């Protein structure tokens, strides 16, 4: 037989071929000027006649190029006598299995591969053509490796992983998630550091960017979705919707009734409708919030009356609320509802707000879009008002990709919400409508994601709170930097987002300095919500209070708070903060 390639790898292959009883005629190597290697002659071109050959070159691309040009040869497959290969393994031509290799049951290995010394390949793995598995690399069961991929020395791939084509897995890397085609992966856990095509580049960028708050799946979401597919419950409604509602009810208290809807905004809209808010009415709303808190007021043809924040919780100021109610009533209009928000997960001062609302008999709607898992005096946010709303938007503490819920206190209120959210169909065999309806119900597929997410909600709350602790540690000695924190033990925030305020007179840096420095490092941070009374779209709306919300807006920044950030991500965040806010301080993430 002939060996194509007379480098170091060629010498190893020559010895294996000898041990397997082959007699070697010569090496073939166009690039080697030597006349012989070991005891064999070196030819500088491929002989023109039919030969038995093995390509003894470690580089996968080169082996493929040679095969593409020299398909006509009969390629030998070699097994070192000290390799331990199960009877049920199938191996393609031109592949070499070296000493000490273990290949377990039902493995399929393609053509022209190298399974190098002491590598191990567990049951049911599928290895494509032109793959090189380096010495001491280990593949768990059911791993698949695409054509041309190189697995470095001592790399480990856990069971069930799919590695794409023409990837490079660095020496010692530990692969715990699937790897797309063309990726270069290093480290433990393996991180993609290079991709060779545009599609992969997007994946790589997603991995490298540190997001403010990205979805964090728990693992069982697909199980519930698959159940929906298996039962063909793809249309809205179905067992996942019921199950998800029950999960939320149990989490919040067990006494509330929850209607799963298409968004938190939809839930607010239905809450206003159920509070009989209509054209020409006024609704009191916290100014410091996302526009979705206020928009449904306009959907109903009503006018928002905005209220400033107080300094402890950044939420609705009870004093300004009382002033507003008295003034609006003096002007001839009693507000129809009060929308209070638990901003970034921080509970509002509910005792004061509820007692003012009760004094004037105005229903409270709690916008708990950001505060699932937060508590005020031990009671879940979202359960205090006449209605509460939740959001499962992609950036929230748990997500259904898009969705929301209305928290009610009676079955009747829930049924009304369900009726309105499903086009308000009267009870008749034909399509009969006596009310205007909406298409606001959550789908059974989204609810499947929600059920999986509810299983990990407690972990997510803990994780967000740990992110808050992480920032507390970084900021503790920083002059002029304050982390938004609970005023006292009555308040338990899920810390959906961690937020800092920067007093530029003391820190000598601004919120923008930090935001731009983060941006440079591909780390997402955001100014806090711009108060609604400062928004052009609401410029004519009445406003009560001073400049608390406005000042906070000017100097506060939301920091990356996701529960799926890695230690490395946190190190990057800490580095930027320390560089910008206190040059001298050192910080290291404890692993
Ligand atoms: C305070 C607040 N209210 C309402 C909403 C609206 O929720 P959704 O996006 O589910 O409509 C959000 C989030 O998007 C929010 O942060």
Image (cartoon, rainbow, N blue to C red):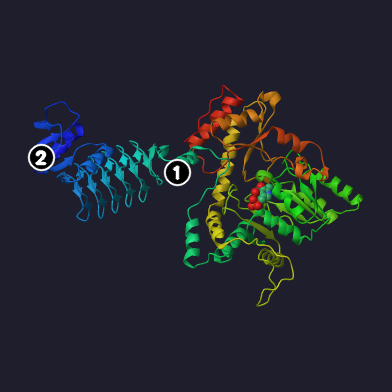
Mark 2 residue CB less than 8 A from any atom of ligand 1: no
Residue occupying the point 51% across, 32% down: 571
Mark 1 and mark 2 residues within 8 Å of each other at the beta carbon: no
Mark 1 residue CB less than 8 A from any atom of ligand 1: no
Residue 379, image x, y percentages: 68, 53
Q: Is residue 109 left or right of residue 534?
A: left
Q: Nearer the viewer, mark 1 or mark 2?
A: 1
Tell me the SS state at disc 2: helix
Residue 455, image x, y percentages: 53, 55
Residue 340: mark in rendering? none
How many marks are shown on the rendered structure? 2
The residue labelled by disc 2 is 18
> On screen, 388 above or below 7?
below
Residue 158, image x, y percentages: 36, 47
Tell me the SS state at disc 1: helix
State the CA–CA distance, disc 1 to disc 2: 45 Å
Q: Who comes first in sequence, dot 1 or dot 2?
A: 2
> On screen, 239 above or below 467?
below
Residue nearer the viewer, 48 or 301: 48
Residue occupying the point 82% across, 51% down: 356
Residue 131, image x, y percentages: 28, 43
Q: In which quarter of the image is the N terminus?
A: top left
Residue nearer the viewer, 399 or 68: 68
> On screen, 298 above or below 115?
below
The residue labelled by disc 1 is 199
């Amino acid at each position: 037989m002939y060996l194509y390639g007379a480098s170091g790898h060629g010498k190893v292959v020559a010895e294996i071929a000898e041990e397997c009883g082959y007699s070697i005629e010569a090496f073939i190597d166009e690039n080697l000027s030597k006349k012989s290697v070991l005891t064999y002659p070196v030819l500088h071109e491929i002989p023109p006649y039919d030969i038995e050959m093995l390509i003894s070159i470690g580089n996968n691309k080169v082996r493929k190029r040679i095969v593409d040009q020299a398909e006509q040869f009969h390629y030998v497959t070699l097994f070192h006598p000290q390799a331990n290969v199960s009877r049920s393994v199938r191996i393609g031509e031109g592949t070499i299995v070296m000493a000490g290799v273990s290949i377990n049951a039902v493995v399929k290995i393609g053509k022209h591969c190298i399974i190098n010394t002491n590598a191990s390949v567990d049951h049911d793995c599928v290895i494509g053509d032109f793959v090189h598995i380096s010495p001491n690399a280990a593949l768990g069961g059911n791993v698949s490796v695409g054509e041309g991929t190189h697995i470095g020395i001592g790399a480990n791939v856990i069971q069930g992983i799919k590695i794409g084509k023409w990837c490079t897995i660095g020496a010692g890397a530990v692969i715990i998630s699937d790897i797309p085609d063309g990726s270069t992966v290093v480290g433990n856990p393996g991180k993609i550091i290079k991709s060779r095509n545009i599609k992969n580049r997007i994946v790589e960028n997603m991995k490298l960017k540190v997001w403010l708050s990205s979805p964090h799946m728990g693992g069982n979401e697909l199980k519930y979705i698959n159940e929906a597919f298996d039962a063909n419950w793809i249309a809205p409604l179905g067992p996942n919707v019921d199950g998800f509602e029950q999960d939320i009810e149990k989490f919040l208290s067990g006494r509330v009734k929850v209607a799963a809807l298409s968004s938190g905004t939809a839930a607010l809209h239905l809450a206003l409708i159920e509070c009989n808010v209509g054209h020409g009415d006024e609704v009191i709303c916290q100014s410091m919030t996302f526009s979705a808190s206020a928009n449904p007021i306009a959907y109903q043809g009503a006018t928002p009356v905005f209220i400033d924040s107080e300094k402890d919780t950044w939420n609705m100021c009870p004093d300004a609320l009382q002033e507003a109610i008295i003034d609006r009533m003096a002007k001839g209009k009693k507000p129809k509802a009060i929308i209070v928000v638990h901003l970034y997960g921080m509970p509002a001062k509910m005792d004061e707000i509820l007692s003012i609302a009760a004094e004037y008999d105005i229903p409270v709607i709690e916008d708990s879009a950001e505060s699932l898992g937060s508590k005020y005096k031990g009671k879940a946010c979202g359960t205090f008002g006449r209605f509460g709303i939740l959001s499962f938007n992609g950036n929230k503490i748990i997500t259904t990709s898009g969705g929301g819920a209305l928290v009610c206190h009676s079955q009747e209120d829930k049924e009304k919400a369900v009726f309105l959210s499903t086009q308000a169909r009267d009870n008749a065999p034909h399509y009969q409508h006596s009310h205007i309806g909406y298409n606001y119900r959550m789908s059974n597929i989204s609810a499947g994601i929600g059920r999986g997410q509810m299983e990990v909600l407690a972990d997510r709350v803990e994780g967000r709170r740990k992110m808050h602790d992480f920032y507390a540690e970084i900021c503790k000695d920083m002059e002029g930097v304050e982390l938004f924190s609970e005023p006292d033990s009555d308040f338990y925030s899920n810390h959906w987002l961690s937020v800092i305020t920067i007093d530029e007179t003391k820190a000598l840096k601004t919120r923008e300095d930090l935001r731009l420095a983060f941006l440079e490092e591909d780390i997402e941070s955001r100014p806090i919500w711009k108060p609604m009374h400062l928004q052009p779209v609401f410029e004519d709306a009445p406003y009560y209070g001073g400049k608390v919300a406005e000042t906070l807006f000017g100097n506060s920044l939301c920091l990356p708070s996701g529960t799926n950030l890695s230690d490395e991500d946190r190190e990057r965040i800490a580095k930027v903060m320390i560089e910008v806010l206190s040059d001298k301080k050192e910080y290291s993430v404890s692993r």
